[in-house]
Amino acid sequence: MKDRVGRMQHRDDDIYASAPLRRLLDAQTCALKPGLQRCFGAHALLLGATFDDAPPALPMLGCWTSLHLVNGRYQGDLQAAAEEPLPFIDDAFELVLLRHALEVAPLPSSLLDEAIRVLAPGGVLALTGVHPFGGWSPWFYWHVRGESPVLQMPWRLRRQLELAGLAVEQMQRVGSAWPGLKTTWRALAGTFGGGYVLVARKRRRLATPLRLKPAPVRVPANGRLSPGTRRSSAL
């Protein structure tokens, strides 16, 4: 009995390292690659669900900060409690990648709000996860039973992003229809894929033009102005 509990705990801890989810992660990376290759900037943030999750190689991005969520805490390049705000200033990153992080976050909606906060205007927010509707949902919950992960509805995430002022550029299902399938048919992936990718861009702040107040012109004693001087309406 004790060995069985140990195997179950090991299985639960390694769900994101399992072969089915590795294949799904690869499919999501391929779907995101064309859009992310165009991202550029000095700083990017990766929030993942597994400790060995590595950021994608993007030539126009300078420095990555990598974190993963474990037992309600951020681990990786820094350590912090996951219930607290992200320890970064506003508009800190040109790209924020949440790779299955919302599934293991104690407060998924708050984490998404924080991701939006630290994203710079004009920057890209990319989300991936297991789709709650389809053949993956029973398999996923069976592996994490007794734990807290919750699958997110992509359309709800899209709604939250749009309400926050982001423009959604990509939203699609990817991967095989069932965890046991090693081959992905494109037609099935588009309709019944086990995972989703969602990409949105944070709109740039509009600059408010300043209205200059006309200043009165002091007229010389001779009553003549220099060439090109415009008389003020105050005269």
Image: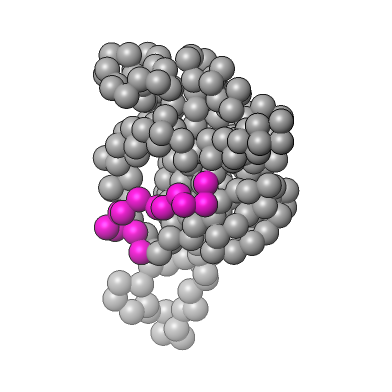
Q: Residue at x 61, y 36 (%)?
A: 7
Visual colour scheme:
one colour
Q: Where is residue 206 in the image (x, y as percent from the top left)?
A: 47, 48
- Which of 205/112 is in front? 112
Question: Where, by quadrant of the figure, is residue 94 drawn?
Answer: bottom left
Q: Residue visible at 46% across and 86% down?
A: 221
In-image side of 187 versus 116 (left or right): left
Observer-nearest of 91 and 191: 191
Q: Is the magenta stretch mostly helix, strand or loop?
A: loop
Q: Name the quadrant containing residue 74.
A: bottom right
Q: Is residue 171 magenta?
A: no
Give coordinates of residue 23: x percent, y percent.
36, 33
Q: Is residue 222 left or right of residue 39?
A: right
Residue 155 x, y percent position in the rendering = 52, 22
In the rendered image of this protein, does residue 23 appear above or below residue 59?
above
Q: Residue 157 location, x and y as percent?
A: 55, 29
Residue 205 shows in the view: no
Quarter the N terminus occupies: top right
Q: Residue at x 41, y 84 (%)?
A: 222
Q: Can residue 76 be seen in this view?
A: yes
Q: Does the magenta stretch include residue 60?
A: yes
> Range of the magenta residues?
50-62
Q: Nearer the viewer, residue 161 or 209?
A: 161
Residue located 29% across and 21% down the image: 184
Q: Image quadrant of residue 172?
A: top left
